[in-house]
Amino acid sequence: MANILFQWLMIACIHLMHPFFVSMTDINYNGKDKELEVSVRIFADDFENTLRKYHSEKIDILHPADEKQMNDFVFDYIKKNLKLQINGEPVEMSYVGYEQQSESIWTYLEVKNIDKADKVNIVNTLLYDYSNNEINMIHVKVNGAEKTTKLNYPEEKAEFQF
């Protein structure tokens, strides 16, 4: 956890000197419930600008005119740009929802019926269609072991072994 805090503090310091584009994906394997809990943090303005590239409707993620439609837009974008494999098998994420925290949008997803997560492969292209300066931070926790990496555009693949 201290590692994540340090990374966010460093990114915040860099942001004061220079604009940046970053997302944070947290994946936690819950062995008791046999599920992956996935959360994705993206700055709201970057996310809105990205969604506007794909939809002619008015995009206001913080105050949507149609909440169901906005949830559909958010989930569709995330599932197209964040793909997971557990132990070599692709898994499908279910959408839980999203919420605003400060200037960010946290999107929550889950994958049920995961007996174990010894190997986690990720393809993450979030916001690559918005900026070629994108940095995607990825943090994975399985059975108490935590690992973190970052993907700089155009890198899109990460693998974690536990």
Image (spheres, helix red, strand yellow):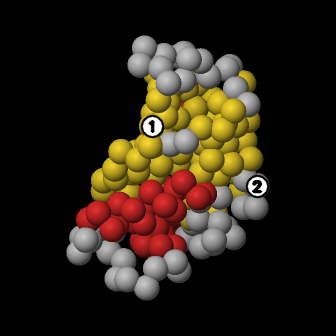
Secondary structure beneath label 2: loop
Q: Which residue is mark 2?
A: 155
Mark 2: amino acid: Glu
Residue shown at 43% from the left, 85% from the top: 56
Q: Quadrant of residue 62?
A: bottom left
Residue sitting farthest toward the bottom? 56
On the question of residue 23 being in view, the answer is no
Residue placed most toward the observer, 144 or 32: 32
Q: How many marks?
A: 2
Q: Give above or below for 59 relative to 118.
A: below
Q: Nearer the viewer, mark 1 or mark 2?
A: 1
**Horizontal placement of 137 versus 94: left or right?**
right
Q: Which residue is mark 1?
A: 110
Circle number at residue 96: none
Residue shown at 30% from the left, 56% from the top: 100
Q: Quadrant of residue 58?
A: bottom left
